[in-house]
Image (tube, grey):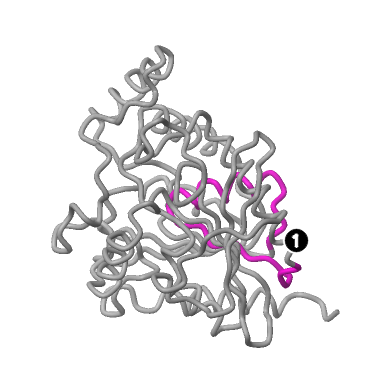
Amino acid sequence: MEEAEFYEEIAEGPSSAGAYWKQTQDEVRVRVGAYHTQSEAKGTILLMLGRFGYIERYGRVAQSFADEGFSTAVIDWRSQGLSDRMASDPNAGHIQFFSDYQKDVAAMMEVVEELGMPKPYYLVGVSMGACIGFRAMLDGLPVAAAAFISPMWGIKMSAAQRIAAWPLSWAAKALGQGHRYVPGESGDIYVLETAFEDNNLTHNADMYDYWVKQAEKAPELQIGGPTMAWLYEALAECRALSSIPSPSTPCITFCGELDRLVDNGSIKARMAKWPNGEFSMIRNAKHDVLTEIPEIGGDVMSQVFAFFDKERAKEPAA
């Protein structure tokens, strides 16, 4: 396992951290990160981030996890961070098949096991990462409990947009044009092109500034908008998952009332039928409820920790 470049200064995470290259089964090189706790270990959080995600983006969150006794494993999905990009335009958020992300999950778990990161494992899935993580759970990902943050179990669109999105994205992919951006999207980096006052992610100015500074110092970690192939594959995966019953794995899910990126209706429908599931709609919150300001989101992270601790307490003593 070869060490990979890791941007410690912009991550602002635990000092005992590193990144590693791993080859997937289809020979894509992905970067996997590990943040290690110095406290008495409670386990490892498998942190699966969204479409803008990369290892360093949640370095501060990983520090909070470490302070609570959790190590964190996180991955740059293919076409994100320093992992191999799938399109000739490196800024394009592009994939061939949504199932390819499961190959990335497998590579991530190989690194977790090779590093001997502490068990049990807990999943924290954010946005697109929650969609990938949910599929991985259905395929047997060995997690004791899961927390989903604004999960992409549906994409927020108007009725007209949804009617157009399916045939247009399918046709683009079928005609070999799947690498083209979704109309209205481009290779521009969102946090550099969008003023804080206009952003869809958070009311937390300090967190937004943290992401802006990361993008300024390491633009190579960033991506722009999604491609038509990504859109078609994401729509198809959300539809496929919607018909599958929820597992019995304990789960807590949060979403923001003002979210403009994911479909809250799909989240409510899923959680209404999840055994051992808890759901919380955060009033006036935007998409990234895990890092929202306390005045709006309360302390979602503390609720996640309390949920995981509750599930740990149910485990029989070793």
* Residue 159, position as x, y percentages in the image: 26, 31
* Residue 129 in the figure: left or right of residue 311: left
Q: Residues within 10 Å of mark 1 (few under 14, many from 20)?
A: few
> Disc 1 designates what residue?
113
Q: Which of 268 and 144 is in front in this view?
A: 144
* Residue 307, position as x, y percentages in the image: 57, 74
* Residue 299, position as x, y percentages in the image: 39, 78
Residue 49 lies, with reference to residue 145, above or below; the image says: above
Residue at 30 percent across and 30 percent down: it is: 181
Which quarter of the figure is the N terminus placed in? bottom right
Which quarter of the figure is the C terminus placed in? bottom right
* Residue 48, position as x, y percentages in the image: 52, 56
* Residue 125 in the figure: left or right of residue 291: right
Q: Can residue 251 be seen in this view?
A: no
Q: Nearer the viewer, residue 170 or 181?
A: 181
Residue 129 lies, with reference to residue 46, above or below; the image says: above
Residue at 18 percent across and 52 percent down: it is: 193
- Magenta segment range? 116-143
Give the residue type that dot 1 points to.
Answer: Glu
Residue 128 lies, with reference to residue 228, above or below; the image says: below
Q: Is residue 74 visible?
A: yes
Residue at 69 percent across and 44 percent down: it is: 139
